[in-house]
Amino acid sequence: MRAIALLTSGGDSPGMNPAVRSITRAALNQGIKVFGINRGYSGLIIGDITELHSSDVTNIVQRGGTILKSDRCEAFKDPVVRNQAAEILREHGIDGLIVIGGDGSLSGAHLLTQETGIPVIGLPGTIDNDVYGTDDTIGFDTAVNTALEAIDKIRDTAISHERIFLVEVMGRNSGHIASQVGIACGAEMIVVPEYEFNLESLCFSLATQRARGEGSSGIIIVAEGPRPGLTSRLATQLEEHGEKPGVCILGHIQRGGRPTGHDRVLASCLGAAAVNYMLAGFSDMMIGMVNNEIVATNLQDIIEKKKVLNPQLVELAQLLHK
Ligand SMILES: Nc1ncnc2c1ncn2[C@@H]1O[C@H](COP(=O)(O)OP(=O)(O)O)[C@@H](O)[C@H]1O
Ligand SMILES: O=P(O)(O)OC[C@H]1O[C@](O)(COP(=O)(O)O)[C@@H](O)[C@@H]1O
Ligand SMILES: [Mg+2]
């Protein structure tokens, strides 16, 4: 192997930059040329590829976002387009590809190697933490902490005004951010796509609080869910029960910002390990961290197996707020 390429794909996540830096420097240290592909698979299919030198990744370990830019690329779901992508890699003399992205990006990487034989290694890069084969994805910890910083402030005003706030965090299909944030901010309730939400029980608990003479302030964390507008719909339902909830949608603030120390270290470890696995001849695998150990998992398993939301976390949140 003489040259590898890397790209970042899907929703960006804080820690992608340290991963890019680690992959680049680990490969260069072993005498391997490194190419950066801009804008994920969108850049790959048009050959937007530039060689990376050590100085290109200087001073990025602390920066959010991704210097390679990221994108969602519908066209890459077409096998013909993936074949063209493989041709482009071959034309550039690239012997292997490292993909940093979420479940979708890793599915694309799996199909690319299966169909074309181009060796690929994946790294879990998404704030959602919805990737099997790793305890944490790169960016998850930063997103949780960013959300918490905002929610602690919302809590202050919620207490002053004895008001309920619905705070929406990201997570279309997964409640990992919501459950961590919910525990850490002492939420009164957590709404996640994985479990049914009981509005009656929330209203009952608010009424009980009031009956005890306690101010009825509270924070309800809502994972955005698959259908836009969930939080507004919940607010309307609460209004129908006589509540006057505030609504705060944290949105893309959760995707930006300086990566936490945890994410920088995770990204650095996984990046260097990805290079080692690729140079050792492995392909079609994702490198993750499980119980503080580097673990390689077949991409087929990553795609087929779902990381289950720990039900104890959601139950613990309910228990602790009482
Ligand atoms: N089933 C698939 N087949 C091929 N490519 C895919 C597939 N799913 C996703 N991708 C590629 O990966 C990109 C990112 O996927 P997406 O699900 O949007 O984000 P993430 O990778 O962060 O989960 C898509 O825009 C597409 O280019
Ligand atoms: O920026 P967009 O395209 O609106 O995407 C929003 C989605 O991206 C995420 O931030 C990250 O998801 P992915 O890692 O799967 O791309 C989700 O939490 C959110 O639902
Ligand atoms: Mg995803």
Image: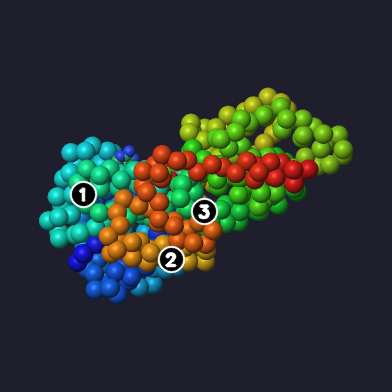
User: Which one is in front, 89 or 40?
Assistant: 89
Q: Which residue is drawn at the image coordinates 56% and 42% (left, top)? A: 309
- Left or right of 315, for residue 108: left
Q: Is mark 1 within 8 Å of ligand 1?
A: no
Secondary structure beneath dot 1 equals loop
Residue 72 x, y percent position in the rendering: 33, 44
Task: Give the mark nearer the N terminus: 1 vs 3.
Answer: 1
User: For mark 2, what is the residue?
Assistant: 269
Q: Which mark is residue 135?
A: 3
Kindly report the distance in space between the C-alpha atoms of the residues bearing marks 1 and 3: 29 Å
Query: Can residue 46 be seen from the camera position used here?
Result: no
Q: Is residue 14 above or below residue 76?
A: below
- The spot of residue 179 in percent (x, y) is 61, 45
The percent coordinates of residue 235 (x first, y second) are 62, 32
Q: CA distance from mark 3 to mark 2?
A: 14 Å
In the picture as drawn, the residue positioned furthest to the top comes out as 240
Between 166 and 196, the one nearer to me in the picture: 196
Camera-side mark, 1 or 3: 1
- On residue 117, the disc is 1
Amino acid type, label 2: Cys
Whichever of callouts 1 and 2 sits on the residue coming sooner in the sequence is 1
The tag earlier along the polypeptide, 3 or 2, is 3
Q: Residue at x 23, y 37 (%)?
A: 78
Q: Which quadrant: the C terminus?
A: top right
The residue at 54%/58% (across/down) is 291
The residue shown at (61%, 53%) is 148
Out of 118 and 57, give the one closest to the viewer.
Answer: 118
Location of residue 199 (image quadrant) = top right
